[in-house]
């Protein structure tokens, strides 16, 4: 379908990316320029990770500064995109009989606005967020993605924000330009290979991918947003990687775009390995 909106997963990395101008952020901006303009965005961020499935249902979501220890300039950033309560109710209906709470207290966390600040810098596309239920297994999250896939044909960009590899214990804090550890490079390449092949089973049951997966995904919060995006994949969708690279040896910045090639939607390619700065990641 020519009008189908892509689905995208972005490795968001350090919150300071919100203020940065580098290979990663420029690639995010190009992605926003090349994709068909969505009527709204449904964001699934690693940082709304709780005990239930909920969706923001407010007209003016607040910008959440849900981190600590960063420069004051970062706390002053606002991303004043409107919400879309009508879309929130539509999501609730699509996911029925699953219980989905309409939430009026959350907002847009930094997993969402730190990347959208570059993809849609004018903050003029409505955004709603969907929470990740930490009590559920990985196949549950992939299944939600499948249920939400029809939204792509209704002009909604489904955006996952996390990191394919997110091992901060092994991150080279004193050297963000550290070459990828062998296990990280292997896992990053393996996942790309599986996505190209459309082989979702080992991606859902990622523990079966062995010791590399255990190191890459010590906790599932930053990985699960990818499964929501993969769940939306439709026949004819190509997979592209607009951004790749591993910071500090153990933090993948891989971006994944699912969509069909058309005259107004061309592949965005790159292999970016430059560090984004030494501020603390989350």
Image (cartoon, grey):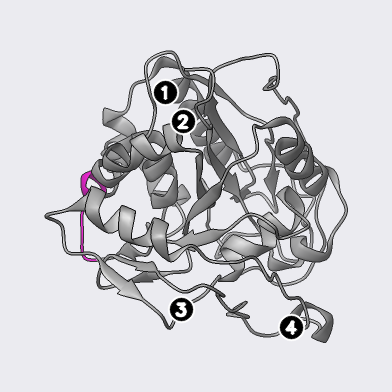
| Structural distance between the alpha carbons of marks 4 and 1 | 38 Å
| Structural distance between the alpha carbons of marks 1 and 3 | 34 Å
Total number of numbered discs in the rendering:
4
| Structural distance between the alpha carbons of marks 1 and 2 | 5 Å
Q: Earlier in the sequence, mark 2 or mark 3?
A: 3
Secondary structure under tag 2 reads: helix
Compare residues 76 and 151 and report the one nearer the observer.
151
* Residue positioned most to the right: 21
In the rendered image of this protein, does residue 104 appear above or below residue 85?
below
Residue 226, percent from left and from top: 44, 44
Mark 1–mark 2 CB contact (< 8 Å): yes
| Structural distance between the alpha carbons of marks 3 and 4 | 17 Å
Q: Residue 106: which disc?
A: 3
- Residue at point 35%, 36% (across, down): 149
Secondary structure under tag 4 reads: helix
Dot 2 crowding, Cα within 10 Å, few <14, some 14–19, many 20+: some
Mark 4–mark 2 CB contact (< 8 Å): no
In the rendered image of this protein, does residue 174 appear above or below residue 87?
below
Dot 4 corresponds to which residue? 75
Q: Residue 191: which disc?
A: 2
Mark 4–mark 1 CB contact (< 8 Å): no
In the rendered image of this protein, does residue 151 appear above or below residue 282?
above
Mark 3–mark 4 CB contact (< 8 Å): no
- Magenta segment, which residues? 135-140
| Structural distance between the alpha carbons of marks 2 and 3 | 32 Å
Secondary structure under tag 3 reads: loop
Dot 1 corresponds to which residue? 194
- Residue at point 68%, 71% (across, down): 80
Q: Earlier in the sequence, mark 1 or mark 3?
A: 3
Residue 246, percent from left and from top: 67, 44
Can residue 58 be seen at all in this image of the molecule? Answer: yes
């Amino acid at each position: 379908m020519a009008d189908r909106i892509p689905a995208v997963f972005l490795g968001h990395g350090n919150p300071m990316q919100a203020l940065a101008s580098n290979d990663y952020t420029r690639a995010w901006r190009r992605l926003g320029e090349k994709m068909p303009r969505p009527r709204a965005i449904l964001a699934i961020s690693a940082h709304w990770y709780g005990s239930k499935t909920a969706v923001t249902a407010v007209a003016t979501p607040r910008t959440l500064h849900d981190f600590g220890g960063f420069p004051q300039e970062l706390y002053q950033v606002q991303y004043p995109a409107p919400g879309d309560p009508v879309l929130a109710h539509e999501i609730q209906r699509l996911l029925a009989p699953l219980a989905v709470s309409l939430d009026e207290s959350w907002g847009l966390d930094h997993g969402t606005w730190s990347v959208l600040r570059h993809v849609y810098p004018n903050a003029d596309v409505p955004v709603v967020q969907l929470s990740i239920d930490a009590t559920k297994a990985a196949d549950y999250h992939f299944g939600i993605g499948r249920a939400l896939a029809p939204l792509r044909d209704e002009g909604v960009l489904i955006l996952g924000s996390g990191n394919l590899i997110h091992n901060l214990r092994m991150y080279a804090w004193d050297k963000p330009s550290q070459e990828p550890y062998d296990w990280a490079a292997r896992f990053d390449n393996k996942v790309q290979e599986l996505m190209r092949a459309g082989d979702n089973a080992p991606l859902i049951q990622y523990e079966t991918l062995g010791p590399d997966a255990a190191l890459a995904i010590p906790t599932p919060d930053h990985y699960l947003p990818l499964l929501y995006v993969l769940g939306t994949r439709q026949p004819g969708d190509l997979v592209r990687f607009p951004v790749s690279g591993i910071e500090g040896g153990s933090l993948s910045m891989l971006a994944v775009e699912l969509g069909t090639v058309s005259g107004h939607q061309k592949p965005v390619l790159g292999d970016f390995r430059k560090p984004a700065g030494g501020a603390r990641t989350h």
